[in-house]
Amino acid sequence: MSKQTAAPPDVDPQLLKNERDEAKNRQKSRLTGLDKEKLIELYRQMLLIRRFEEKSAEVYVAGKIGGFCHLYIGQEAVGVGTISAIRQDDYVLASYREHGLALAKGMSARSIMAELFGKATGCSKGKGGSMHMFDKSLGFLGGHAIVGGQIPLATGTAFATKYQGTDQVTLCYFGEAAVNQGAFHESLNMAQLWKLPCIYICENNQYGMGTSLARAMSLQNIAQKACAYDLASEFVDGMDVLAVREATLRAVERARRDYLPTLLEIRTYRFMGHSMSDPGNYRTRAEIEKYQERDPIKLFAASLLEEKIVEQKGLDEIDRQVREVVEDALRFADESPLPDPEELYTDVYANPIEPGRK
Amino acid sequence: MATITIREALNQALREELARDDKVFLMGEEVAQYDGAYKVSKGLFHEFGGKRVIDTPITELGFAGLGVGAAMAGLRPVIEFMTFNFSILATDQIINSAAKMLYMSGGQINIPIVFRGPGGSAFQVSSQHSQALESWYAYFPGLKVVMPSTPADAKGLLKSAIRDDDPVIFIEQERMYGNKGEVPDDPDFTIPLGVADVKREGKDVTIVARSLTVPLALKAAEQLEQQGVSCEVVDPRTIRPLDIDTIIASVKKTNRVVIAEESHPICGVGAEISAQIMERAFDYLDAPVKRVSGADVPMPYAKNLENLAIPDVNRIVAAVREVAYID
């Protein structure tokens, strides 16, 4: 049994270039079979998330966003690749690092930015904030902020699907640190025991806050843990949006056709700190740069250009468009009203009870 | 009216609600093939099958969270904890997911779920299997907490809890499953949540009791009647939301209050009721509010020590005599 090393050693530039070229060649071999519009849409979504998160960081520093703010920069290929493989009526449940997933599921940049600003027009009416984004109409069932808490919930939406005889699948996202929680193990056991159509997506960005995988996990091959519950699993390169999409399509087919769960370990890397307050002293600049060489957006752009699917001019135009979407969201959030003070006491109960009413 | 046990009343409520709405399912440890550890679900697996009545592995956090997720997707789960002691493992999902989902989603996602099972003191099972947890759950906005004390209340309140669109913690008293009482035959009989019941009318002292202490308070009231003290016994039935108006109305009539509960006294429901009485009826009180609570110790095993740890009729009688300035 081979153990993966958690903190890769610094490597020389030539090796890095070779590795990057190999990744690109692997990705280019996956370009066939997808039409141009779909490929460009994947690129557009990744870039929208990147620009949205860059802007979030900027306005967070300016004090427009409160509380915790966990950015998705570096992990865009995971969200876009997985969600491109499902339908709009499928469910997505995520952790607190969910802005990018919400965008990928089709929620508007306006509603997400307004939520970050704590405004009445936010997707959760300003009551959830960065960590609790919801849009029931799009099947985006939250940002959940206790590590691993969303895993039993997602197992439950998959249970409901099978119970009702419909064919939606559930995508459940969590970081690798959540794998040490009991909720992960309890859920995988039930999902395979009862054959529930849930796809467990471990976004392995290799750090649980400031603690590396090597310091936190005895068996670091996460995909292998699926064996304990007799679950199908795959290890996926999370810097390659097409590899992510293909693996998810295989899992979706198992879930939709046969009500079977899958564990995907998608290896990725966050380029920013755990949250906006994290200075990131626990990892080296060289390590971050190594992964930035494999930046999923840069990698995909290079593949698209080299295969002449799009020209640089086209990519520049996409960048201009998504920056406009983000600027519009920012203006919208800024100009939106704060929640009415009366909202403090609404939404506590669906059936509020006036005690003593007969 | 039929005379049945609390166990049978709960079983009827589950059967009727399973039959009424196919979105309702019952899930928990040993609820199906074993007929329930306490036989509350007896016969339901046979009648409704394994799709609706589901045995789980011993995985409380997991199946509690699965239930909440199923409720997010439109089902109406009834999750049984074999005892509420085991719900401690599931509190993250009950509190952080079920109670808060509607609020933090800005009103989009309500959680129509019932967490039910036996709670409170049991018979000589020591500290980990014998404790009252209602004040934990009653603390959290977003949850409703129900504690029936009679077969009719058990049936009527459980049916309301299952039909309710919010998460309900439904705590059945483990020692009381065999208690008998009259229950209406009407299959649509329900009791609304949030309404207290005056179990006995009186004029001298109010005893606020719930769950296990209701029959104890009624016995105490009988003895006190012989001693010339007329007691009113008020059973809130729902702890959150609390029907404080009914309690206050009684206090304004009697001017003296004893709160009887089997839970620990510190930060308990009795402390909350006492504080609200002080805030709303201080000028009506002729004596300080008196609590009769479980001992402030983990539950012991030895029978004599266990008896000392749980409120009994004598302690309630003594407390009433104290607030009435008889002794």
Image (cartoon, coloured by chain):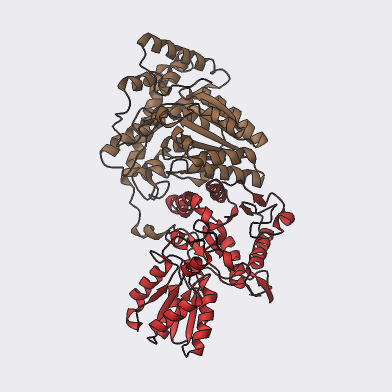
Chain colours: A brown, B red
For the N terminus of chain A, the quadrant is top right
Residue B199 in view in this figure: no
Q: Is residue B243 above or below residue A162?
A: below
Q: Nearer the viewer, residue B289 or B139?
A: B289
B20 relative to A298 in the view: left or right: right
- Percent across and percent down for residue B291 are 41, 73
Number of numbered labels in the structure image: 0
Residues A33 and B162: in front is B162
* Of the pair B231 and A119, the residue shown nearer to us: B231
**Whether residue B315 can be seen here:** yes
In this view of the protein, which residue sits in the foreground, B196 or A32? B196
Q: Residue furthest right?
A: B46
User: As drawn, which residue projects farthest toward the top?
Assistant: A14
Residue B199 location (% of width, % of height): 53, 79
Q: Residue at x 65, y 61 (%)?
A: B40
Q: Residue at x 66, y 58 (%)?
A: B21
Q: Residue A257: x and y, percent? A: 67, 34
- Image position, residue B16 (x, y; %): 67, 63
Q: Residue at x 26, y 37 (%)?
A: A61
Q: Is residue A144 left or right of residue B74?
A: left
Left or right, A354 with respect to A59, comes to: right
Residue found 44% across the figure and 13% down from its top: A19
Which residue extends farthest bottom?
Answer: B228
Q: Is residue A149 above or below residue A250?
A: below
